[in-house]
Each structure stands twice: as structure tokens, then as C-alpha cells.
Image: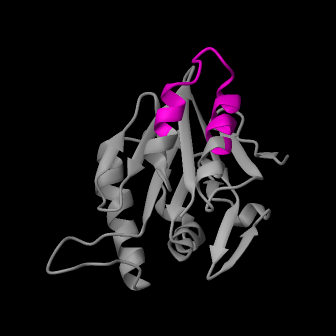
Amino acid sequence: MSILIAYKKDNTIFMGTDTRLIINERKTNKLCKCDYKIQKMDNEMLVGIAGDRIVRQTCFAFSEIFTLDKNNNLTRKHIFTQIIPKLIELLTEHELLSSKNNQPPKINAEILLAYKSELFEICSNFTICKYEDYQAVGNISNYVQFILANTNKNHDVNQRIIKALDIASKHSQHVSRPYVLIDTKNQDYKLIEE
């Protein structure tokens, strides 16, 4: 599992993640945009997925499930009534949900959705959280949230995200440079190497 960070400032959501993939015992960094953990959808929504790589690849292969409502907004109601049912159907069809002892289904991933100034998380148990400041999901996310809370709020948001990713990389083999940054305003990927 990796780490995804989203930070809201000035009605823009800034997102960052690393490119590390661990396949069995092999560590690699994927620099192909098609394999980034944050993808921009045709409707300008940013979707970040931390967790099982096959879940991420499946969701991004069927990216049409990440829709906006009829007013071109991303709302909790729309996520609950439209995106999550399609997501469950897709992951059920591909046998990527886990369920134990008649418990509700779960996915081995956490999803961040960002559109304009809206930031939501779809948790592994399909609950929805909305954030007004920042969120980190994935490996050592609590630690990363602590780092973000204790960086200077007047500093550049991307620099704060890079600092949090750098510190996370020192404490987890699952996180390493290059990093990928993107925001809901400019929608351009920035690759941060060394």
C-alpha cells in the first residue's frame, strides 16, 4: 500500500502520491501516467486510490463510474447513490471484494475523490467522509496527517505535500520518489524526482 495526500487551499484540492510499487519482493517505481495512483477523469474529477493495485487498475479501467451529478457537482448523495453502487457492482464482477461472516463487503483500498473544491473519501467499508482541510490515506496515513497538521500553513501546499511524502518515505518501504502532484485547478501532473 502507498500513501495519498489531498490538501484543500483557496478552493483548490492539491493531491500528491508516490510511484512505488511492490510486486512480491520486487520494488519498482512506475513513471507511466496510466499507472499513476491519481488519475484525472474526463469530467475533471481527480481520483486517487491507495491499496491493492488490481483494485486500482480495475477502477481506472472503468473510470466512467466516477461521475458527477446532473448539476456537474460532486456530492455525498451522488457518491452514495451512483458511484458506490457501480463500484460495488464492478468489484463484485471481478471478485475483488472481501466479506466475512455475513459482514458488508470491503475493498482492499481507500479512494479519494476531488472535484473543484470538494474532497471526499470512500473508505474500505464504503463509508463516505468529506474533508474541508486535508486527508491522507494508505500506508502510515495517521503519521502523514500529523506531519501535515504540523507544517506551516503559510508555506506552499505542494512543498508541504512533498515534505510529508519525504518523511513518510523514511519510515516506510512502500513510499519513495518520484512523487506525482496534481491539483483540481490546473489539472497538470508534476513529477518530483530528486
Q: Position of residue 96 (x, y in %)?
A: 41, 80
Q: Furthest-top residue in view?
A: 154
Look at the picture and state if 68 lies above or below 151: below
Look at the picture and state if 77 lies above or below 27: above
Q: Position of residue 71 (x, y in %)?
A: 43, 39
Q: Is residue 70 visible?
A: no
Q: Residue at x 52, y 25 (%)?
A: 150
Q: Position of residue 31 (x, y in %)?
A: 79, 62
> In terms of secondary structure, what is the magenta stretch mainly?
helix
Q: In the figure, residue 188 lies in which quadrant?
A: top right
Report the magenta residues as a range: 145-166
Look at the picture and state if 131 lies above or below 53: above
Q: Residue at x 61, y 82 (%)?
A: 24
The one of 150 and 58 positioned closer to us in this rendering: 150
Q: Furthest-left residue in view?
A: 102
Q: Position of residue 123 (x, y in %)?
A: 35, 55
| Label total for image | 0
Query: Is residue 161 within the magenta segment?
Result: yes
Look at the picture and state if 31 lies above or below 103: above
Q: In the figure, residue 159 lies in which quadrant?
A: top right
Q: Residue at x 46, y 28 (%)?
A: 133
The one of 92 and 165 positioned closer to us in this rendering: 165
Coloring applied to the structure? one colour
The one of 18 and 117 positioned closer to us in this rendering: 18
